[in-house]
Image: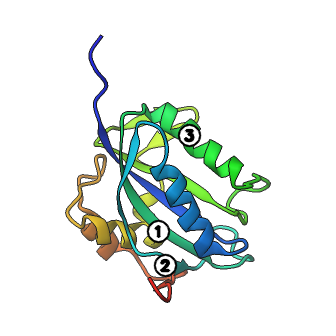
């Protein structure tokens, strides 16, 4: 059996309930404290307009870069556990949430399983993901689309995707 390899992973962090910024910061601390995982970097947080279900409060969103020995499925289980620990209840798709942790990229792997799709299937269409990704690594290449985060961000229409820095970030 070969030893596990460490992988650079990008995780989206978001909240639009309660103290949104505090929720995001707590989630980042919890992810950084996971077994076999270390926090490498964090984008600034942004205030972002909701997509999909628009009749809800605006979000605070950001992206973190971690290094992990966890498999994609084990990482997903750990992130879901943090969401549950923080009080996340899944009532409606794209509905309000105290915390949301999404695996955006897992190295350059492409995964299409019942409960996990990597790269995140909508990341290239979401300004609230791409702006923080550009802050972390503008030249990072999307493993399916073959384009950099900066190119993907530049190509987005601004309609319905307002993103503004959070004060104090």
Q: Does residue 14 sit above or below 34 in this rendering? A: below
* Of residues 68 and 111, the one drawn nearer to the viewer in this rendering: 68
The residue drawn where x is 72% and y is 54% is: 88
The residue drawn where x is 41% and y is 36% is: 36
- The quadrant where residue 4 appears: top left
Is residue 50 among what the camera can see? no
| Circle 1 Cα neighbour tier, 10 Å, few/some/many (<14 / 14–19 / ≥20) | many
Residue denoted by label 2: 46
Mark 2 near mark 1, Cβ–Cβ under 8 Å?
yes
Task: Name the spot of residue 44 as percent of width and height, x first.
Answer: 41, 75
* Of residues 88 and 92, the one drawn nearer to the viewer in this rendering: 88
The structure's colour scheme is: rainbow
Choose the circle earlier in sequence order: 2 or 3: 2
- In space, the residues marked 2 and 1 are separated at their CA atoms by 6 Å
Q: Does residue 47 sit above or below 13 in this rendering? A: below
* Of residues 161 and 25, the one drawn nearer to the viewer in this rendering: 25
Q: Is 3 placed left or right of 59 in the picture?
A: left
Task: Name the spot of residue 101 as percent of width and height, x first.
Answer: 55, 54
Q: Is 84 placed left or right of 155 in the picture?
A: right
- The quadrant where residue 91 appears: bottom right
Q: Residue furthest right?
A: 91
Task: Name the spot of residue 116 as percent of width and height, x first.
Answer: 52, 38
Is residue 147 among what the camera can see? yes
Q: Does residue 46 sit above or below 87 in this rendering? A: below
- In space, the residues marked 1 and 3 are separated at their CA atoms by 19 Å
- Foreground tag (2 vs 3): 3
In the image, which disc is placed on residue 78?
3
In the image, which disc is placed on residue 62?
1
SS state under label 3 = helix
């Amino acid at each position: 059996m070969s030893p596990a390899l460490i992988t650079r992973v990008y995780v989206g962090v978001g909240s639009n309930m309660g103290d949104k910024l505090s929720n995001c910061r707590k989630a980042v601390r919890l992810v950084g404290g996971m077994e076999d995982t270390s926090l490498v970097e964090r984008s600034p947080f942004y205030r972002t307009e909701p997509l999909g279900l628009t009749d809800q409060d605006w979000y605070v969103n950001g992206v973190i870069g971690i290094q992990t020995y966890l498999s994609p499925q084990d990482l997903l289980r750990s992130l879901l556990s943090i969401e549950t620990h923080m009080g996340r209840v899944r009532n409606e798709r794209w509905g309000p949430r105290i915390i949301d942790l999404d695996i955006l990229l897992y190295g350059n792997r492409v995964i299409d399983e019942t409960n996990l799709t990597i790269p995140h299937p909508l990341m290239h269409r979401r300004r609230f993901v791409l702006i923080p990704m550009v802050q972390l690594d503008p030249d990072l290449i999307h493993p399916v689309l073959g384009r950099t985060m900066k190119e993907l961000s530049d190509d987005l229409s601004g309609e319905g995707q307002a993103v503004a820095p959070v004060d104090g970030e």
